Image: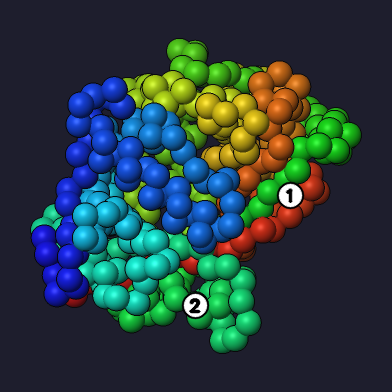
Amino acid sequence: MTTTVPGLQFRSLTIPASMDAGDAADFREFTRVRNLVYREIAGTDDDAMTPEELLPHYQADPDEIRHAWVVIVDGAFVGRVGVDLPLEDGSRNAFWLVELLAAHHGRGIGSAGYRLIEQTAREHGRTILQSWAQHPDADGDRLVAPTGYGSIPRDHAARFYLRHGYTLEQIERQSELILAGADATVRHLLAEAETASAGYRVVQWQGATPATHVDAYAWMKSRMSTDAPSADLDFDEETWDAERVARHDAKYVESGRTKLVTAAQHVDSGELVAFNELVIGTDPTGPSHQEDTLVLREHRGHRLGQLVKCAGLQTWRRDIAPQSPKVITYNAEENRPMLDINERIGFVPVAYNGAWKKVLT
């Protein structure tokens, strides 16, 4: 597809079978530009991935359709456009991104890419479009989230969303924990949680989910799609089973990344009722990421969130990623139960993301 911007093309991304394949060059360059864009926004390489780490997330997936385009100007890759279409029954959602190197902002390229997104969403019958962007703090006018929690500057990204008919729905806090010096606090809070959670025990695993825990883990992952605070955003209730868990696990194994799941098991019933995930890439000295954390509603009030977070961090630091300098995590700004735990552990806010939504007519 071409536009009135001279030398501009949007080319469908070729997804190679592996990074050793003869058609892998575009994906390698796609990843390089992705990492550069994130470095420009955040000033760090904390979200960088190697092509080998990223590729499994772009392979065919029965749970979603993923469309991706590379943005090319005068033969050079300058950004990417993507839209994900969940395949849950009756889904109306599309999740998208437009990411450009800063030198190419203000030329109409982002708007041209966005037209691809709306066109694709309409072709698939999707009417709810949602997207996230980091908004580095800055002076000047601000937008307050309708939840009443948090605000962002009316920056370049915010103006882009507003110009295309989006509303800000939620602020997401990015926090990080510097692991050096956190061990004593984690030990103290873990002991505190163990006392408060009598009747529960910790179970952990890496790699493939053990068969004895697959059904319970699948149920908790399905609840993650509905139970986390979501303001007026729209999320499908995801259906997880053993096959979906296996696909989820395989993405980490194939990418070479390491994932630790720490769960709380109700002793009397044997059911898993809370979990936390920690992940690190192939560089053992790189940052770690805390991904999903959930306590099932009927088991809240026993400090199980604190239990699985602290037990996970202790194992992570001692046995799995002792060279990792920090852990990064994301929470809705109104999710005080999780933020309270994180803050007690020592996580501090470092950035804020806006969650944006538009309903197509």
Question: Can you tell which quarter of the image residue 253 is in?
Answer: top left
Q: Which mark is residue 347?
A: 1
- Element marked by disc 2: loop
Check the image and tell me how it is coloured.
Answer: rainbow
Q: Residue at point 17% right, 52% down?
A: 11
Mark 1 and mark 2 residues within 8 Å of each other at the beta carbon? no
Tell me the kind of residue under disc 2: Asp
Q: Quadrant of the C terminus?
A: bottom left
Which comes before the other along the chain, label 1 or label 2?
2
**225 with respect to 19 (left or right):** right
**168 with respect to 202 (left or right):** left
- Say whether residue 235 is visible: yes
Q: Residue at point 66% right, 41% down?
A: 327
**70 with respect to 322 (left or right):** left
Of the pair 23 and 349, the residue shown nearer to us: 23
- Say whether residue 148 is visible: no
Q: Quadrant of the N terminus?
A: bottom left
Tell me the kind of residue under disc 1: Phe
Of the pair 220 and 311, the residue shown nearer to us: 311
**256 with respect to 127 (left or right):** right
- Element marked by disc 1: loop
Q: Residue at point 45% right, 13% down?
A: 211
Name the residue that disc number 2 marks.
155
